Image (tube, coloured by chain):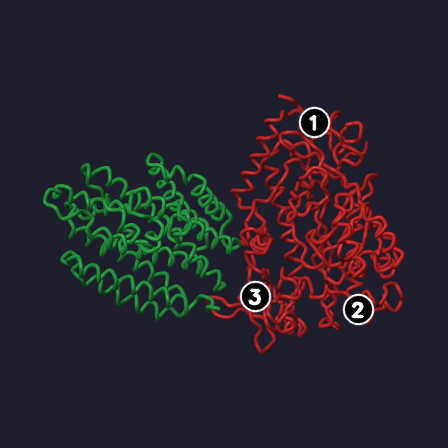
Amino acid sequence: MKHIDWKTYDTGKVWDELVDPQGRPRPHGEQLAKLLAGMDADDLASRQAAADLALKEMGITFTVYSDETQDAIDRTWPFDIVPRIIAKAEWDRIEEGLKQRVMALNRFINDLYHDQDVIRAGIIPKEILASSSNFRPQCIGMSPRFGIWAHICGSDLVRDRDGTVYVLEDNLRVPSGVSYMLENRLVTKRVFPELFEDYAPLPVDDYPSQLYDTLAALSPRDIEYPEMVVLTPGIYNSAYFEHSYLAQQMGCELVEGRDLYVDSDDCVYMRTVGGPARVDVIYRRVDDLFLDPEAFHSDSMLGVPGLLRAWKAGKVALANAPGAGVADDKVVYSYVPDIIEFYLGEKPILPNVPTWRCMEPEALADTLANLENRVVKPANESGGYGMLVGSASTKAEREEFARRLKADPRNYIAQPVLGLSTVPTIVEKQMEPRHVDLRPFILSAEQQQVTMGGLTRVALRKGSLVVNSSQGGGSKDTWIVPVDKE
Amino acid sequence: MLSRVAENIYWLARYLERAENTARLLAANAALHLDLPRGITPAWEPLVAMAGARELFERQHPDYSEKEVVRFMIGCEKNPSSILSSLRAARENARTIRDYLPREAWELINKHHLDAGEQLNEGLSQRGRHDYLKRIIHNSQTLNGMLAGTMNHDQGYHFLLLGRNIERADMTSRIIDVRTDGLLPLDSELRPFETIQWVSLLKSLSAYQMYRRSMQARVRRGDVLIFLFQSQDFPRSIRHNLCNIERSLKTLPNHEPAVRILYQIKTQILSTQVEKMKCAPLHDFIDQVQIALDQVHGEISSAWFLPAE
């Protein structure tokens, strides 16, 4: 059988995380490259099959919707066994950058719901806030504990051709994926036990206890064991697996809206077999607008009437706080370097991807003239929906986007088409480069914590840059490894 | 514990038990088939009747042939009580309370459901059927053992037991009902095979050996009925299940209304001479048992589950 020859592995014009353009493994990837090269195609395929089977039997799934049947399908999580490795020294800098970024973003959100200094100082134009679909006027004047609104943030990182790591976007509403990060490690241990003897990737599995501590710190009642729950929209939500996983790992109840109610004392209770039980902290995985039919969408079946009232009365903590998603806005994203300088007086450690704000006439004109070489994103979508990848688009799609841009420029940003870095991925028993991004998770309360690495998502289709699982992406284990100085 | 979780765990247990009992019944019917003289086949129709799916079946199938009934009872997605539908419902309930179940139990339920679907063709073939059904039974039993050995024996566990025991009592009563009602045509030439009929009934409930041991009698209608209704020790007798239900109920708050109904039916079972009942009165008596079980279920719902939306 044919073995892998890294010399013939074509990294193309982008940065490969494992091997350099000459086909030499990068220093932190030597043992992995060697191990892989020692395996033939059948070895690789059988390890991949073992991983797929394990995921299937463990029931590690995500939910997708099918247009044909109108049914939600519970699909096995797509996973590639070749891990993505990052050297600890590089990671340390990224971690600092993420902490800095999320700290500034939390200061920013808090400011928006109070004095709005950032607007008065002219850092952010007033119109952005006025037209932000995720700004919640209901939250004005609220002061969550520690001034933290986004307790859990998932920021997406990408590496461009020259090796620079950029922040692609921040997810401060209800970021998901952390459970897959944890499960990927578990499966990789089963599939490549020998690798763990050569490497000692930093462990990721303390995340649930860190999350627990972060949430417990928010409890309005000063008691040793606050009652915490994870609020899910239910089994038809695409991230349902994650919701139940986190509840299980933290040993708290997984609840749906109908399990909870707010009583006349403004406290939140859950309906239990033994009667009502008071809830202190809700890790909510339901979007703002569905949280409370009294305050937001009145027809929401997912929420809990009066929840916002309970939160404002300080009787229950919500993580993330309602309104935190205002910083998810991709136009706001474009200002994050300024936001960091404004609140922290520091230079940003991690750069943004160069971004054109289509609300600015020159940027709009430039974008319209160069649609083929741009990625155009709506300001407030998630999951990879509603965006245009110019280099992979048809003329009709570009015309459609030009029309949308002109109709609502505030709602769009444009970025260059990046050459996302690649990681070797098993494709039909062969090793081929596939584009990846990385989503680390940042926890903030009294202290900040960043996961060791994060969730690496991989675009399984050749040449594709879209890594979202709802769009056919898969994932890989991510290793942060200490490397001896050479 | 959350009312919704209690409800889901209760239904999880019911569906699992239903799949297992359906598998037992199909296996016993198939075995009986092989024991009878050529030309005499056990009716397959009662199996469909037992599942309460006669109308559904007749809409899709011209006759009650073995092949059609087996397919309907094992793999038909439109039949809500087929083995596959039951396992799917069990898995869906388990998925909803995944955070609550021990991880290994979830994985087994998931695998149980996957296997049943993937190996369906084997289950439908005459040669593969025995092994297929045996695996369904084994998986359910393994799961029962795993849950007993890994879950806290707290309220949640009692909801699991409640679901299992109510379903089991109900299924036992249904199986007795179809099996005592014209299994073989009334024909003097078939007298020698009458015993086989009662043996088959016992076997559908895996009760044959235990019957022998505890009754120390020939396999006769009257003794079989006494055993299946009134045995204190056999885990699938109706009395045994009612006692278990009572024990679980009493661990929960506000259990009085459910326990009251249970007492009545238990007293009735102990004071009735089932062995002397002819077909029609027996059928009515079984009806009463089923109605009482349904009432107990109703009381459980209103005491502990989420109010209907």
For discs 3 and 1, the disc positioned in front in the rendered view: 3
- The crowd level at tag 2 (other Cα within 10 Å; few <14, some 14-19, many 20+) is few
Chain on which label 3 sits:
A
Q: Give the spatial CA distance, label 3 vs label 2.
A: 30 Å
Report the amino acid beneath label 2: Ala
Report the amino acid beneath label 1: Lys
Hue used for the chain lettered A:
red
Residue at 27% in and 52% down: B175
Residues marked 3 and 2 touching at CB (< 8 Å): no
Question: In the rendered view, would you say B133 is above or below A215?
Answer: above
Report the amino acid beneath label 3: Gly
Q: Nearer the viewer, residue A272 or A116?
A: A116
For discs 2 and 1, the disc positioned in front in the rendered view: 2
Circle 2 residue: A130
Q: Nearer the viewer, residue B102 or A470?
A: A470
Circle 3 residue: A257
Residue at 67% in and 28% down: A36
Relative to B300, is B37 on the left or the right? left
Hue used for the chain lettered B:
green
| Residue B252 image-quadrant placement | bottom left
Circle 1 residue: A34
Residue found at the far left of this picture: B188
